[in-house]
Image: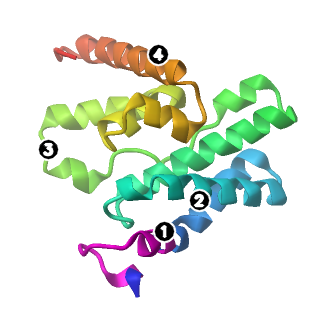
Amino acid sequence: MARHRRGKAFSEEEKIQSIYWQFVELAYYTALDILQHKEDAEDAVQETFIRIMKYISRIADPFSSETKNFVVIICRNISLDMLKKRKYKKEEELFAYTQGGAFGPDPSDLASGNETVRIIAEEVHRLPDRYKDCMYMELVLEFHYKEIAAILGQKPETVRKRLQRGKKVLRKKLEAMGLSCEN
């Protein structure tokens, strides 16, 4: 079964199945937490995996923390878009939602890095979601801003601006800590 083939090459079908079975519950609870409606959460999960299938060739390891974060980012954004369209909640609640730890640097990934890398990763994790998601997808998953825009259902210019602003906020935080930033 594909679920036990860590470290080996996967076909696209195996990747899709592995990602689905490993993260479908996480996606559902992410969507349900935002939408507060079972049927809407199911719709959001379905749309999440349809969108993931479009980018399946970019996913190397369906069991990685990067894949988990990718699923959460997509599901959260789809759910927030659905919530916005419904207009059941105030606009402030849309931006107050946070994932509560499901997204962020994997401690094992940071253990081998130096202190500066750890600090930068922690500061990226503390950024507002609109910046954090875009920066994660660019820096860790190595997506181009136009790809990020398509995945998140945003305009490319919006994503480009969020990346610029997120980097500016991050740079200021790091400089306040005495760390210099080149880019």
Residue labelled with disc 1: 16
* Numbered disc 2: secondary structure: helix
Image quadrant in which you'd find residue 168: top left
Distance in Å between CA atoms under marks 2 and 1: 8 Å
Image quadrant in which you'd find residue 84: top right
Q: Nearer the viewer, mark 1 or mark 4?
A: 1
* Numbered disc 1: secondary structure: helix
Earlier in the chain: of badge 2 and badge 4, it is: 2
Which numbered dot is residue 49?
2
Q: Which residues are magenta?
A: 3-17
Residue in the picture at 40% in, 88% down: 1
Which numbered dot is residue 113?
3
Residue labelled with disc 4: 161
Of 75 and 147, nearer the camera is 147
* Numbered disc 3: secondary structure: loop
Of 99 and 8, nearer the camera is 8
